[in-house]
Image (cartoon, rainbow, N blue to C red):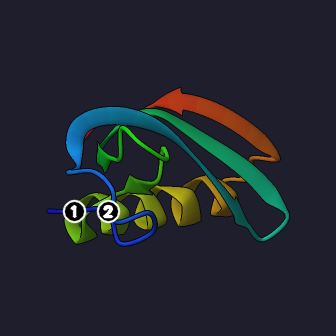
Amino acid sequence: MWCVICKQAELKPGKVTVTLERKGATLVFKGVPAQVCPNCGEEYVDEKVSATLFKRADELAKEGAQVDVREYVA
């Protein structure tokens, strides 16, 4: 797949850091699998991974986390 932002390069598999805000909490997930453009750096996280991140972010916010940094676990 080609990058839809720069249209100059084919995406490569990689790992990225995703920051989400939920109910006043800032949650950071490191090592998230994604497709990354080697030209412009745009990151694409697939639907399944995104759903996992959103679910975990909601859980952490409900538990009262204000700031949380953790490694992504599928």
Can residue 8 be seen from the camera position used here?
A: yes
7 versus 35 height, above or below: below
Residue located at (63% from left, 31% from top): 69
* Disc 2 crowd, CA 10 A, few/some/many (<14, 14-19, 20+): many
* Secondary element type, mark 2: loop
From the viewer's side, name the closer residue of 26 and 47.
Answer: 47
Q: Which mark is residue 74?
A: none
Q: Which residue is mark 2?
A: 3
Q: Quadrant of the N terminus?
A: bottom left
- At which x and y percent is residue 9? 27, 51
In this image, 24 relative to 18: left or right?
right
From the viewer's side, name the closer residue of 42 and 74.
Answer: 42
| Residue type, mark 1 in image | Trp
**Can you name the residue that lies furthest to the front here?**
8
When asked about the image quadrant of residue 50, the answer is: bottom left
Residue located at (56% from left, 66% from top): 58
* Secondary element type, mark 1: loop
Q: Which residue is mark 1?
A: 2
